[in-house]
Amino acid sequence: MSNSYYGCKKLLLHTIDDYFKKVRNLGEGAFGVVYLANTQNLAKTEIGEDLPDQVAVKVMKISGAQREAMKQEITIMKHIDLPRNIKFFGCFETASQLYVIMDLAKGRELFDYINDGSMSAQQKKSVAREVAAGIKELHDIGVVHKDIKPENIMVELLPDGKSANVRIIDYGLACLVPVEGSMGRNCYGMGGTQAYKDPKQQEGNVESMKMGDWWAYGHTLYAMYTRTLLYIADEGRFINPGWKALNKHVPEEYHDLFLTLLDVDTPQVDRPGQDEIITEIGRDYVF
C-alpha cells in the first residue's frame, strides 16, 4: 500500500472488508455514511494491535468538488486525540472512496434524548458541562467545529443516574486554525446548520467563528432543556429566549447566561466568552 493525496493508505491487494467487517449503519455525516464494523486481524497487524475490536468506519465518495474539504476533515481528525471528541485510527483509499477509521462513540445522539425526554435534571447538567469541555478541548488545539448541534453530540448516560459521557462527532465542516506552535488555515465558508448557526459570525475571522460554536452550544442547551428551538424557520430568523420558558424548564443558575449568550441583538464581542461560559456552566466542576 502507498499513501495518497489524502495521506491515506491505498487499497491495492485487499478490500476494506479484509480489514473491517460491516455490522450496521450508524448514521450520515457531512460527507459520508458511518457504519459499525468488526476489526479483522489484518487491520490490527497493519494499524496496531491496540485497535479496538469494534470501530466506526466513515465511507466518503471521492469528489473533485469536495476534495479539499475531505482532505481538511482527515487532517483535522489526525490532529484530534481528546477525551470528549473522536479518536482517529487511520484511513484507506480506493479509486472512488475513502474509508476513515474512528473510535466508536457509545450511547445515543443528544437529539434522541431530547425527543424522548428521558434525561434527568442532573444528567442534563452533566451533558451541558461535558459538551462545554469538549468544545474548549477543540478550541485549545485550534479546531473550530462549525456544526455543534444535538445530532453531533453522542451521550452515554452512566449508571449513577447523574452523570454522562459525551463525545462530539462529525468534523466535516470543521477547520484548523493557527495556534501557538502549529500551522493552520483560517475558517472560510460559513457552514453549519441553520437553526444553530450564528447570524453574526464573520467568515475568516477565527475568534468570530469560535464564538459561533458557543452560540450553537447555547442553542443546543436551550433545545435540550425546553425541547424547542429559538430559530423560526418560516421567517428565517432567531427570537430571544423568554422568561416563561426559562422559569419553567431551565435551572435558575443558567438564566443570565442564556439571556446574554442567546440574545439576537447583542454583538458577538459583548456576549459571554469561553471563560465566562465555562465558569457559569461548570460551577463545582473540574474541566
Image (tube, rainbow, N blue to C red):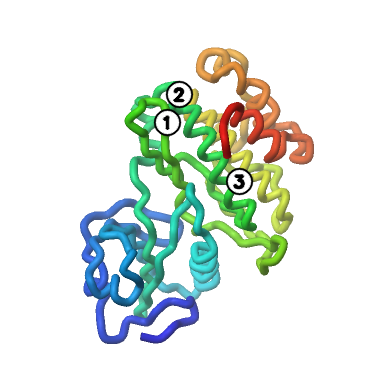
Q: Is residue 198 visible?
A: yes
Q: Residue at x 66, y 27 (%)?
A: 257
Secondary structure state at the residue bearing disc 2 = helix
Q: Are marks 2 and 3 in contact (CB under 8 Å)?
A: no
Q: Quadrant of residue 88?
A: bottom left
Residue under pointer 2: 122
Badge 1, how many Cα within 10 Å: few under 14, some, many 20+? some
CA–CA distance in space, label 2 to label 3: 21 Å
Q: What percent of the width, then of the height, locates residue 232? A: 56, 32
Q: Nearer the viewer, mark 1 or mark 3?
A: 1
Q: Nearer the viewer, residue 17 or 59?
A: 17
Image quarter where the N terminus lies is bottom left
Q: Which mark is residue 136?
A: 3
The answer to the question of whether label 1 and label 3 lie on touching residues, with beta carbons closer than 8 A, is no
N-term-proximal mark, 2 vs 1: 2
Residue marked by disc 1: 163
Residue at point 62% right, 33% down?
238
Disc 1 residue type?
Ser
Residue located at (46% from left, 39% from top): 150
* Percent coordinates x, y for residue 259 in the rendering: 67, 24
Foreground pick, 136 / 228: 136
Camera sees residue 234 = no
Location of residue 22 with respect to 126 vertically, above or below: below
- Which tag, 2 or 3, sits closer to the chain's start? 2
Which three-letter amino acid code belongs to the residue tagged 2?
Gln
